[in-house]
Amino acid sequence: MRFRSTRGGQDSDLTGAILQGLAADGGLFVPESVPVLDPASIKGESLAEIAAGLLAPFFAGSELEAELPGICRDALDFPVVLRELRGEPEALAVLELFHGPTAAFKDVGARFLAALLERILPRGGDRGRRPLTILVATSGDTGGAVAAAFHKRQGIRVGVFFPRGQVSPRQRHQLCCWGDNVRSFEVDGSFDDCQALVKAAFRDPELNGRLRLTAANSINLGRLLPQVAYHAAAALWYFRRHRQRLSAIVPTGNLGNGVACVWARAMGMPIDRIIFAVNSNQTIPDFLSTGQWRARASKATLASAMDVGDPSNMERLRDLFPELGDLRSAVQAYPVDDDGIRAQIARDYSRFGAIWCPHTATGFHAYDGLPESARRGSAWCVSATAHPAKFETIVEPIVGRGIDVPPALAAILRMPAESIPLAPRLDELRPALADWA
Ligand SMILES: *Cc1c(COP(=O)(O)O)cnc(C)c1O
């Protein structure tokens, strides 16, 4: 399969699109056309098996085609669970995406990208023998997932940049505990400063040439494709059990999780309606209601991993639905403010005995905001994007109890953490990376 830029200026094969991340014309890579499959043709019960069947058309003709099942087994080796909730008259389920090493769904995409790159790089001949360097700016979850996924992988080094004092203590630990091929920089500045520093390193010919820089941000196809697979798997599991299509509520900010769900439905998977739950950053719902795209600076909210004012993946969505009317019938968006998040966490703790992270809470708030006819008319599933123990300083006071830390996260918290303080300037970064040849 070939992939083209949403801006029409480039096309590429799969491995090229993954190595490049962003297309040369600034657009995002999308499949030339979305492949449509018969759901009954997808075999297997585990996420890894379903992913291998579902993603096969994207890998057709690629040098990695034969390795896809192995990549899926390697990357998707932790449980993804569709749990049906009791206590509601209507059918409601939660898709738990937080059982990976860093307790957020970012593990899915980061581990898949790592498994891909580890197999692509040795094929590059001489060029492939020199290590590749991933630089990642993070506001919290992405950096930890990328560091965990690439830790000790051959031929790849990782530099993580995070803003000092602006990540939770547990997130900070996840960013700084790796060592070996991972180096963590605690930047004296904001997330935007971290991002600007990474971009400046990319534009610097000496650094980029010597380190062979690459990006692992969420616009990379290698992160998006496995996310399509978990939305497909949830719908297939539900359909096999109940012979009914599942409607999805997806907490999203940059629209990675959202577009993945839309692609799963476009591929013919038994998904009915799709609702994006967002926080007070309302660029997406405003666009759906007015037709005007108004990107803006992001606002800090309790669901911080969704604090995005200019969601990049909107470009992929508008590519699939160029007409506003079609887009409006395809998806809806529902904004939830911080008061709504707090109230939802409290409400669902008493209703289901379940504790959500702030991001997941936006999804359940959206569910409760549906008209009763919509709740009765379909079976619904909310994606749970992170484990609440990662956001214990927000969640514990609301539910009035401590939250058990999952074993993988506890293991990370026991490791010693080390970071390099850094001013957000290239002349400070250069010597800190001098020993990476
Ligand atoms: C990254 C993240 C999101 C939002 O993901 P998108 O790619 O913007 O859809 C939601 N919840 C958590 C916990 C995250 O880490």
Image (cartoon, rainbow, N blue to C red):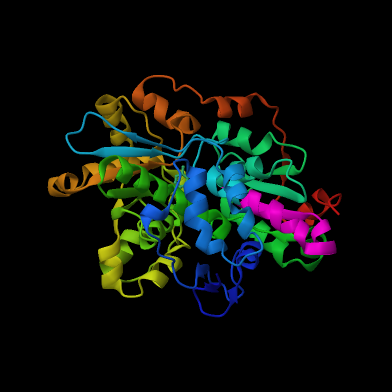
Q: Measured from the top left, where is residue 432 in percent x and y? A: 80, 48
User: On the image, which quarter does residue 102 sit in?
Assistant: top right
Q: Measured from the top left, where is residue 175 in percent x and y? A: 64, 39
Report the magenta stretch's main SS.
helix
Q: Nearer the viewer, residue 3 or 216?
A: 3
**From this viewpoint, which residue is outermost toward the bottom?**
9
Whether residue 221 is situated above or below residue 149 in the rendered picture: below
- In the image, is 122 to the left or to the right of 364? right
Quarter holding the N terminus?
bottom right
- In the image, is 6 to the left or to the right of 95? right
Identified at 52% across, 79% down, the residue is: 8
What residue span does the magenta drawing correspond to?
113-138
- In the image, is 26 to the left or to the right of 334? right
Whether residue 27 is situated above or below residue 410 in the rendered picture: below
Q: Nearer the viewer, residue 352 or 396?
A: 352
Quarter holding the C terminus?
bottom right
